[in-house]
Amino acid sequence: MPFSSLGLSPALLSTLVEQNYTKPTPIQETSIPAILSKKDVLGIAKTGSGKTAAYVLPILMNLQQSVLVKNRQANVLVLVPTRELAEQVKDIFKIFSKALPQPVKTLAVYGGVSINPQMMALQGVNVLVATPGRLLELLDANSVQLSAIETLVLDEADKMLNLGFKEEMNKILAFLPEKRQNILFSATLSTDLENINQILLHYPVVIKIADDELSLDLINQVAYIVSPEKKGPFLRHLISQQKMKQVLVFASSVQQVDAIVNKLCKNKIDAKSIHSKKSHGNRTDTLTLFKAGKLRVLVATDLMGRGIDINFLPFVINYELPRSPKDYVHRIGRTGRADAPGEAISLVSPDELHHFEVIQKKMGKKVEIRETEL
Ligand code: ADP
Ligand code: MG
Protein backbone atom coordinates (compact mmCIF):
# COMPACT_ATOMS: atom_id res chain seq x y z
CA MET A 1 0.00 0.00 0.00
CA PRO A 2 1.46 3.42 -0.92
CA PHE A 3 1.73 6.32 1.56
CA SER A 4 -0.90 8.15 -0.50
CA SER A 5 -3.61 5.66 0.58
CA LEU A 6 -3.01 6.23 4.28
CA GLY A 7 -4.82 9.54 4.63
CA LEU A 8 -1.80 11.86 4.72
CA SER A 9 -1.87 15.39 3.29
CA PRO A 10 -0.12 16.45 0.07
CA ALA A 11 2.43 18.41 2.12
CA LEU A 12 3.45 15.30 4.05
CA LEU A 13 3.45 13.17 0.90
CA SER A 14 5.84 15.54 -0.83
CA THR A 15 8.22 15.51 2.14
CA LEU A 16 8.09 11.70 2.12
CA VAL A 17 9.19 11.70 -1.51
CA GLU A 18 11.94 14.18 -0.73
CA GLN A 19 13.14 11.97 2.14
CA ASN A 20 13.14 8.88 -0.10
CA TYR A 21 10.51 7.10 1.93
CA THR A 22 9.12 5.25 -1.05
CA LYS A 23 6.65 2.99 0.72
CA PRO A 24 5.45 2.58 4.28
CA THR A 25 7.03 -0.10 6.44
CA PRO A 26 4.57 -2.65 7.91
CA ILE A 27 4.34 -0.84 11.26
CA GLN A 28 3.70 2.48 9.47
CA GLU A 29 1.04 0.97 7.24
CA THR A 30 -1.01 -0.20 10.21
CA SER A 31 -0.27 2.50 12.80
CA ILE A 32 -0.84 5.58 10.68
CA PRO A 33 -4.59 5.03 10.04
CA ALA A 34 -5.18 3.98 13.68
CA ILE A 35 -3.47 7.07 15.09
CA LEU A 36 -5.21 9.31 12.54
CA SER A 37 -8.56 8.09 13.86
CA LYS A 38 -7.46 9.13 17.37
CA LYS A 39 -7.27 5.60 18.71
CA ASP A 40 -4.86 4.47 21.41
CA VAL A 41 -2.13 2.39 19.84
CA LEU A 42 0.39 -0.09 21.14
CA GLY A 43 2.88 -0.80 18.36
CA ILE A 44 5.56 -3.44 18.57
CA ALA A 45 8.13 -3.79 15.83
CA LYS A 46 11.82 -4.38 15.86
CA THR A 47 14.50 -1.70 15.90
CA GLY A 48 14.94 -0.06 12.53
CA SER A 49 11.39 -0.71 11.37
CA GLY A 50 10.44 2.97 11.14
CA LYS A 51 8.48 3.40 14.35
CA THR A 52 9.27 7.12 14.61
CA ALA A 53 7.54 8.12 11.38
CA ALA A 54 4.73 5.70 12.27
CA TYR A 55 3.63 8.16 14.95
CA VAL A 56 5.14 11.46 13.75
CA LEU A 57 3.20 11.53 10.46
CA PRO A 58 -0.34 10.95 11.82
CA ILE A 59 0.31 13.21 14.82
CA LEU A 60 1.30 16.05 12.52
CA MET A 61 -1.83 15.40 10.45
CA ASN A 62 -4.04 15.51 13.53
CA LEU A 63 -2.32 18.68 14.77
CA GLN A 64 -3.35 20.40 11.56
CA GLN A 65 -6.95 20.07 12.76
CA SER A 66 -6.18 21.34 16.26
CA VAL A 67 -6.33 24.88 17.47
CA LEU A 68 -2.70 25.46 18.37
CA VAL A 69 -2.39 27.61 21.46
CA LYS A 70 0.59 29.90 21.59
CA ASN A 71 1.73 29.72 25.18
CA ARG A 72 3.45 27.16 27.38
CA GLN A 73 0.81 24.50 26.81
CA ALA A 74 2.13 21.84 24.49
CA ASN A 75 -0.37 19.74 22.51
CA VAL A 76 1.72 16.61 22.12
CA LEU A 77 4.14 15.06 24.59
CA VAL A 78 6.66 12.45 23.48
CA LEU A 79 8.58 10.78 26.29
CA VAL A 80 11.87 9.08 25.48
CA PRO A 81 14.57 7.44 27.62
CA THR A 82 17.65 9.25 26.32
CA ARG A 83 18.89 12.60 25.15
CA GLU A 84 20.05 11.14 21.82
CA LEU A 85 16.63 9.77 21.07
CA ALA A 86 15.02 13.07 22.09
CA GLU A 87 17.14 14.84 19.47
CA GLN A 88 16.41 12.24 16.80
CA VAL A 89 12.66 12.35 17.33
CA LYS A 90 12.64 16.14 17.33
CA ASP A 91 14.53 16.12 14.03
CA ILE A 92 11.94 13.83 12.41
CA PHE A 93 9.12 16.11 13.61
CA LYS A 94 10.97 19.11 12.17
CA ILE A 95 11.62 17.47 8.82
CA PHE A 96 7.98 16.53 8.34
CA SER A 97 6.64 19.83 9.72
CA LYS A 98 8.48 21.91 7.14
CA ALA A 99 5.91 21.90 4.37
CA LEU A 100 2.79 22.02 6.55
CA PRO A 101 0.35 24.93 6.10
CA GLN A 102 -0.07 25.41 9.85
CA PRO A 103 3.37 25.70 11.48
CA VAL A 104 4.19 23.23 14.25
CA LYS A 105 6.89 24.04 16.76
CA THR A 106 8.83 21.11 18.22
CA LEU A 107 11.31 21.22 21.09
CA ALA A 108 13.48 18.55 22.70
CA VAL A 109 14.28 18.88 26.40
CA TYR A 110 16.63 16.63 28.35
CA GLY A 111 19.05 16.73 31.24
CA GLY A 112 22.81 17.12 31.21
CA VAL A 113 22.63 20.59 29.69
CA SER A 114 21.62 23.91 31.15
CA ILE A 115 17.90 24.29 31.78
CA ASN A 116 17.49 28.02 31.11
CA PRO A 117 17.58 27.99 27.32
CA GLN A 118 15.02 25.18 27.38
CA MET A 119 12.76 27.24 29.65
CA MET A 120 12.90 30.15 27.22
CA ALA A 121 12.32 27.99 24.16
CA LEU A 122 9.19 26.39 25.61
CA GLN A 123 7.07 29.37 24.67
CA GLY A 124 4.69 28.35 21.89
CA VAL A 125 5.83 24.74 21.66
CA ASN A 126 3.30 22.33 20.17
CA VAL A 127 5.26 19.09 20.28
CA LEU A 128 7.43 18.56 23.33
CA VAL A 129 9.92 15.69 23.21
CA ALA A 130 11.33 15.05 26.68
CA THR A 131 13.21 12.76 28.97
CA PRO A 132 11.26 12.30 32.22
CA GLY A 133 13.75 13.82 34.68
CA ARG A 134 14.15 17.12 32.87
CA LEU A 135 10.44 17.38 32.16
CA LEU A 136 9.74 17.12 35.89
CA GLU A 137 12.27 19.87 36.60
CA LEU A 138 10.53 22.09 34.05
CA LEU A 139 7.15 21.28 35.55
CA ASP A 140 8.47 22.11 39.01
CA ALA A 141 9.69 25.45 37.72
CA ASN A 142 6.28 26.08 36.17
CA SER A 143 7.92 26.50 32.78
CA VAL A 144 5.50 24.24 30.99
CA GLN A 145 1.94 23.03 31.41
CA LEU A 146 0.62 19.65 30.40
CA SER A 147 -3.08 20.34 30.85
CA ALA A 148 -3.67 20.78 27.11
CA ILE A 149 -1.89 17.59 26.03
CA GLU A 150 -4.03 15.76 23.47
CA THR A 151 -1.60 13.01 22.65
CA LEU A 152 0.98 11.20 24.74
CA VAL A 153 3.65 9.05 23.10
CA LEU A 154 6.02 6.73 24.90
CA ASP A 155 8.82 5.85 22.51
CA GLU A 156 10.87 2.84 23.59
CA ALA A 157 7.92 2.22 25.88
CA ASP A 158 9.43 -0.90 27.44
CA LYS A 159 12.23 1.29 28.81
CA MET A 160 9.90 4.13 29.82
CA LEU A 161 7.75 1.75 31.82
CA ASN A 162 10.41 -0.25 33.59
CA LEU A 163 11.22 0.25 37.22
CA GLY A 164 13.96 2.80 36.67
CA PHE A 165 11.50 5.36 35.30
CA LYS A 166 8.45 4.29 37.28
CA GLU A 167 8.38 7.02 39.89
CA GLU A 168 9.03 9.79 37.39
CA MET A 169 6.45 8.41 34.99
CA ASN A 170 3.78 8.32 37.68
CA LYS A 171 4.47 11.93 38.58
CA ILE A 172 4.25 13.02 34.95
CA LEU A 173 1.03 11.10 34.32
CA ALA A 174 -0.58 13.00 37.18
CA PHE A 175 -0.06 16.26 35.25
CA LEU A 176 -1.78 15.00 32.11
CA PRO A 177 -5.47 15.35 31.33
CA GLU A 178 -7.29 12.04 31.63
CA LYS A 179 -8.87 12.31 28.24
CA ARG A 180 -6.06 11.98 25.77
CA GLN A 181 -4.72 9.72 23.05
CA ASN A 182 -2.04 7.28 24.23
CA ILE A 183 0.53 5.87 21.86
CA LEU A 184 3.18 3.37 22.89
CA PHE A 185 5.92 2.07 20.64
CA SER A 186 8.47 -0.52 21.57
CA ALA A 187 10.79 -3.07 19.99
CA THR A 188 9.86 -5.70 22.53
CA LEU A 189 6.75 -6.60 24.43
CA SER A 190 8.26 -7.00 27.86
CA THR A 191 6.33 -7.83 31.00
CA ASP A 192 6.72 -4.24 32.21
CA LEU A 193 4.85 -3.15 29.16
CA GLU A 194 2.10 -5.73 29.48
CA ASN A 195 1.33 -4.70 33.02
CA ILE A 196 1.20 -1.01 32.56
CA ASN A 197 -0.56 -0.69 29.25
CA GLN A 198 -3.77 -1.66 31.00
CA ILE A 199 -3.60 1.54 32.97
CA LEU A 200 -2.36 3.68 30.17
CA LEU A 201 -4.38 2.63 27.17
CA HIS A 202 -8.12 2.70 26.53
CA TYR A 203 -9.15 -0.12 24.19
CA PRO A 204 -5.89 0.16 22.33
CA VAL A 205 -5.28 -1.03 18.84
CA VAL A 206 -2.43 -3.47 19.34
CA ILE A 207 -0.14 -3.82 16.38
CA LYS A 208 2.61 -6.37 16.53
CA ILE A 209 4.81 -6.87 13.52
CA ALA A 210 6.53 -10.23 13.71
CA ASP A 211 10.29 -9.91 13.52
CA ASP A 212 10.72 -12.49 10.86
CA GLU A 213 7.99 -11.27 8.58
CA LEU A 214 9.42 -7.80 8.65
CA SER A 215 13.12 -8.45 8.47
CA LEU A 216 12.90 -10.92 5.60
CA ASP A 217 11.62 -8.29 3.19
CA LEU A 218 14.56 -6.05 3.98
CA ILE A 219 17.20 -8.71 3.54
CA ASN A 220 18.80 -9.62 0.25
CA GLN A 221 19.30 -13.34 0.51
CA VAL A 222 21.62 -15.23 -1.76
CA ALA A 223 23.21 -18.67 -1.65
CA TYR A 224 26.30 -20.06 -3.35
CA ILE A 225 26.92 -23.70 -4.04
CA VAL A 226 30.37 -24.42 -2.59
CA SER A 227 31.92 -27.76 -1.71
CA PRO A 228 33.05 -28.06 1.93
CA GLU A 229 36.78 -27.89 1.13
CA LYS A 230 36.29 -24.73 -0.96
CA LYS A 231 34.28 -22.86 1.66
CA GLY A 232 37.37 -21.36 3.35
CA PRO A 233 38.84 -19.76 0.21
CA PHE A 234 35.39 -18.71 -0.97
CA LEU A 235 34.66 -16.95 2.32
CA ARG A 236 37.91 -14.98 2.03
CA HIS A 237 37.09 -14.17 -1.58
CA LEU A 238 33.63 -12.85 -0.60
CA ILE A 239 34.96 -10.73 2.25
CA SER A 240 37.58 -9.03 0.15
CA GLN A 241 35.67 -8.84 -3.13
CA GLN A 242 32.61 -7.22 -1.50
CA LYS A 243 34.87 -5.08 0.72
CA MET A 244 33.01 -6.19 3.85
CA LYS A 245 34.02 -4.18 6.89
CA GLN A 246 31.74 -5.80 9.47
CA VAL A 247 30.51 -9.31 8.93
CA LEU A 248 29.07 -11.96 11.21
CA VAL A 249 29.79 -15.55 10.15
CA PHE A 250 27.89 -18.50 11.55
CA ALA A 251 29.25 -22.04 11.74
CA SER A 252 27.85 -25.20 13.28
CA SER A 253 30.43 -26.19 15.90
CA VAL A 254 33.03 -24.70 18.23
CA GLN A 255 35.78 -26.56 16.34
CA GLN A 256 34.58 -25.24 13.01
CA VAL A 257 34.38 -21.67 14.37
CA ASP A 258 37.98 -21.85 15.61
CA ALA A 259 39.20 -23.35 12.34
CA ILE A 260 37.55 -20.56 10.32
CA VAL A 261 39.08 -17.85 12.51
CA ASN A 262 42.53 -19.43 12.24
CA LYS A 263 42.36 -19.55 8.47
CA LEU A 264 41.12 -15.96 8.21
CA CYS A 265 43.84 -14.65 10.50
CA LYS A 266 46.53 -16.58 8.59
CA ASN A 267 45.29 -14.79 5.49
CA LYS A 268 45.51 -11.43 7.25
CA ILE A 269 41.77 -10.93 7.62
CA ASP A 270 41.05 -9.62 11.09
CA ALA A 271 38.75 -12.17 12.78
CA LYS A 272 37.78 -13.40 16.23
CA SER A 273 35.46 -16.07 17.54
CA ILE A 274 32.71 -16.16 20.06
CA HIS A 275 31.51 -19.50 21.45
CA SER A 276 30.77 -21.39 24.64
CA LYS A 277 34.41 -22.40 25.29
CA LYS A 278 35.48 -18.76 25.65
CA SER A 279 35.36 -17.01 29.00
CA HIS A 280 32.60 -14.53 29.64
CA GLY A 281 35.13 -11.68 29.78
CA ASN A 282 36.68 -12.69 26.50
CA ARG A 283 33.28 -12.87 24.81
CA THR A 284 32.29 -9.45 26.07
CA ASP A 285 35.58 -7.91 24.88
CA THR A 286 35.24 -9.46 21.43
CA LEU A 287 31.66 -8.29 21.11
CA THR A 288 32.56 -4.75 22.17
CA LEU A 289 35.28 -4.61 19.51
CA PHE A 290 32.93 -5.91 16.87
CA LYS A 291 30.13 -3.53 17.75
CA ALA A 292 32.53 -0.59 17.64
CA GLY A 293 33.50 -1.56 14.12
CA LYS A 294 37.04 -2.41 15.20
CA LEU A 295 36.82 -6.09 14.30
CA ARG A 296 36.19 -7.06 10.70
CA VAL A 297 34.90 -10.61 11.08
CA LEU A 298 33.13 -12.23 14.00
CA VAL A 299 32.61 -15.98 13.78
CA ALA A 300 29.98 -17.50 16.07
CA THR A 301 27.96 -20.59 16.85
CA ASP A 302 24.17 -20.31 16.93
CA LEU A 303 24.07 -20.39 20.69
CA MET A 304 26.40 -17.42 21.07
CA GLY A 305 25.05 -15.64 18.04
CA ARG A 306 21.69 -15.37 19.70
CA GLY A 307 23.13 -13.10 22.38
CA ILE A 308 24.58 -10.71 19.84
CA ASP A 309 22.30 -7.73 20.21
CA ILE A 310 23.49 -5.59 17.34
CA ASN A 311 20.70 -3.66 15.71
CA PHE A 312 22.03 -3.61 12.25
CA LEU A 313 24.71 -5.50 10.39
CA PRO A 314 25.43 -5.09 6.71
CA PHE A 315 26.45 -8.74 6.21
CA VAL A 316 25.66 -12.11 7.71
CA ILE A 317 27.24 -15.23 6.25
CA ASN A 318 26.17 -18.81 6.89
CA TYR A 319 29.34 -20.85 6.51
CA GLU A 320 27.15 -23.88 7.08
CA LEU A 321 23.40 -24.05 7.27
CA PRO A 322 21.84 -24.39 10.69
CA ARG A 323 19.77 -27.49 11.45
CA SER A 324 16.55 -25.64 12.04
CA PRO A 325 14.85 -23.18 9.70
CA LYS A 326 14.07 -21.05 12.76
CA ASP A 327 17.78 -20.64 13.48
CA TYR A 328 18.30 -19.63 9.86
CA VAL A 329 15.81 -16.79 10.25
CA HIS A 330 17.37 -15.79 13.59
CA ARG A 331 20.79 -15.64 12.01
CA ILE A 332 19.84 -13.56 9.01
CA GLY A 333 17.49 -11.37 11.05
CA ARG A 334 20.54 -9.49 12.27
CA THR A 335 20.77 -7.63 9.04
CA GLY A 336 18.41 -5.36 7.11
CA ARG A 337 16.33 -2.42 8.22
CA ALA A 338 14.09 0.15 6.65
CA ASP A 339 16.73 2.46 5.22
CA ALA A 340 19.55 0.00 4.61
CA PRO A 341 18.89 -3.45 3.24
CA GLY A 342 21.34 -6.05 4.47
CA GLU A 343 22.82 -9.03 2.77
CA ALA A 344 22.56 -12.62 4.01
CA ILE A 345 24.82 -15.03 2.19
CA SER A 346 24.74 -18.79 2.60
CA LEU A 347 27.51 -21.13 1.52
CA VAL A 348 25.66 -24.32 0.67
CA SER A 349 27.50 -27.52 -0.13
CA PRO A 350 25.88 -29.90 -2.64
CA ASP A 351 24.74 -32.25 0.10
CA GLU A 352 23.14 -29.35 2.03
CA LEU A 353 20.99 -28.41 -0.97
CA HIS A 354 18.05 -30.54 0.04
CA HIS A 355 18.09 -29.08 3.56
CA PHE A 356 18.22 -25.60 2.06
CA GLU A 357 15.04 -26.39 0.12
CA VAL A 358 13.35 -27.24 3.41
CA ILE A 359 14.54 -23.97 5.00
CA GLN A 360 13.22 -21.92 2.07
CA LYS A 361 9.83 -23.67 2.24
CA LYS A 362 9.52 -23.09 5.97
CA MET A 363 10.35 -19.42 5.71
CA GLY A 364 8.11 -19.03 2.67
CA LYS A 365 10.71 -17.36 0.53
CA LYS A 366 12.79 -18.44 -2.44
CA VAL A 367 16.48 -17.64 -2.34
CA GLU A 368 18.57 -17.15 -5.46
CA ILE A 369 21.16 -19.91 -5.70
CA ARG A 370 24.34 -19.15 -7.59
CA GLU A 371 27.00 -21.47 -8.91
CA THR A 372 30.58 -20.55 -8.02
CA GLU A 373 33.64 -20.55 -10.22
CA LEU A 374 36.17 -21.03 -7.46
P1 ADP B 1 12.77 2.37 14.92
O1 ADP B 1 12.31 3.49 15.82
O2 ADP B 1 11.70 1.38 14.60
O3 ADP B 1 14.01 1.69 15.44
P2 ADP B 1 13.40 4.49 13.08
O4 ADP B 1 12.11 5.21 13.14
O5 ADP B 1 14.54 5.07 13.84
O6 ADP B 1 13.20 2.97 13.50
O7 ADP B 1 13.77 4.31 11.53
C1 ADP B 1 14.92 3.63 11.11
C2 ADP B 1 15.44 4.21 9.82
O8 ADP B 1 14.55 3.91 8.74
C3 ADP B 1 15.56 5.72 9.84
O9 ADP B 1 16.78 6.07 9.26
C4 ADP B 1 14.40 6.21 9.00
O10 ADP B 1 14.69 7.42 8.36
C5 ADP B 1 14.22 5.09 8.01
N1 ADP B 1 12.83 4.92 7.53
C6 ADP B 1 11.72 4.90 8.28
N2 ADP B 1 10.62 4.67 7.53
C7 ADP B 1 11.05 4.53 6.27
C8 ADP B 1 10.38 4.28 5.02
N3 ADP B 1 9.06 4.11 4.94
N4 ADP B 1 11.15 4.20 3.91
C9 ADP B 1 12.48 4.36 3.98
N5 ADP B 1 13.18 4.61 5.11
C10 ADP B 1 12.47 4.69 6.26
MG1 MG C 1 12.74 4.16 17.68
Image (spheres, rainbow, N blue to C red):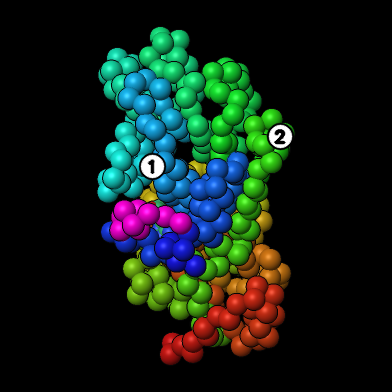
Q: Amino acid at mark 1?
A: Gln
Q: Pick the residue in front: 163 or 353.
A: 163
The answer to whether residue 205 is seen in the rendering is yes
Q: Residue at x 71, y 69 (%)?
A: 324
Q: Is mark 1 within 8 Å of ligand 1?
A: no
SS assignment for the magenta stretch, majority? helix
Determine the image quadrant of residue 210.
Answer: bottom right
Q: Position of residue 104 (x, y in %)?
A: 32, 37
Q: Residue at x 53, y 53 (%)?
A: 33
* Quadrant of the frame with the C terminus: bottom left
Q: Residue at x 60, y 25 (%)?
A: 178
- Residue topped by disc 1: 64
Q: Residues within 10 Å of mark 1 (few under 14, many from 20)?
A: some
Q: Position of residue 346 (x, y in %)?
A: 54, 75
- Residue topped by disc 2: 198
Which numbered marker is on residue 10? none
Determine the image quadrant of residue 198.
Answer: top right
Query: Magenta residues?
Result: 7-16
Q: Residue at x 42, y 55 (%)?
A: 8
Q: Pick the residue in front: 84 or 143.
A: 143
Q: Residues within 10 Å of mark 2 (few under 14, many from 20)?
A: few
Q: Earlier in the sequence, mark 1 or mark 2?
A: 1
Q: Is residue 279 magenta?
A: no
Tell whether 141 sits left or right of 196.
left
**Dot 2 lies on which element?**
helix
In the image, residue 146 sits, relative to residue 49, either above or below, namely above
**Dot 1 lies on which element?**
helix
Q: Position of residue 347 (x, y in %)?
A: 54, 78
Q: Pick the residue in front: 59 or 194.
A: 59
- Find the residue positioned furthest to the top: 141
